[in-house]
Image: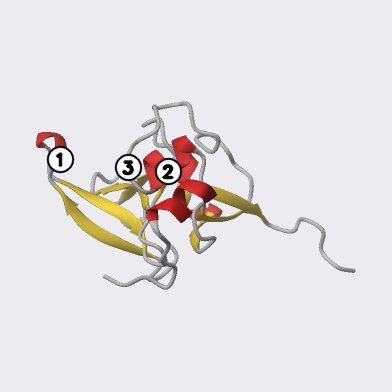
Amino acid sequence: MGYSVEKSDAEWREQLSPDEYKVLRKAGTERAFTGKYTDTETKGVYACKACGAKLFESDTKFHSGCGWPSFYQPITDTVEYIEDNTFGMKRVEVRCANCGSHLGHVFPDGYGTPTGDRFCINSISLTLEPADEAEPA
């Protein structure tokens, strides 16, 4: 698939830290309960760390206890879904639709969410853009 943002492997390596590169470009996973946004409750929008595309709104984030930030739905058409049969499991990988970077996986395991889905996303693949708390008078 062609993406709006395409870079060479060397360009991605230059832009991203080694840990970011491992997750975003090589479909790695950060360790559970170590990510910056696992327990964050700041209002705002979560964007792709690689390209800046807006992916998830904070009001769709919930505490699942799984060790990674969890969301029940992405912003419309911002992610793509890839069948993932690695490690002897059948899962659905979630990638940024703008640059193809690996974000995490989606599971249809409920958790009482409005969609019944849990998007289990690596913190390292995200950047939080806090909502502007100051309302103009």
Label 2 crowd bin: few (<14), some (14–19), many (20+), radius 10 Å:
many
Residue that mark 3 sits on: 111
Residue that mark 1 sits on: 86
Mark 1 → mark 2, Cα distance in angstroms: 19 Å
Percent coordinates x, y for residue 107 in the rendering: 25, 46
Farthest residue toward the right?
137
Label 3 crowd bin: few (<14), some (14–19), many (20+), radius 10 Å:
some
Do the residues under discs 2 and 3 have CB atoms within 8 angstroms? no
Q: Which mark is residue 54?
A: none
Do the residues under discs 3 and 1 have CB atoms within 8 angstroms? no
- Which secondary structure lies at badge 1? helix
Q: How many numbered discs sit on the rendered protein? A: 3
Given this view, does label 2 or label 3 mark the residue nearer the observer? Answer: 2
Marks 1 and 2, the one that precedes in the sequence: 2
Q: Is residue 69 left or right of residue 118?
A: right
Percent coordinates x, y for residue 57 in the rendering: 52, 58
**Closer to us: 50 or 41:** 50
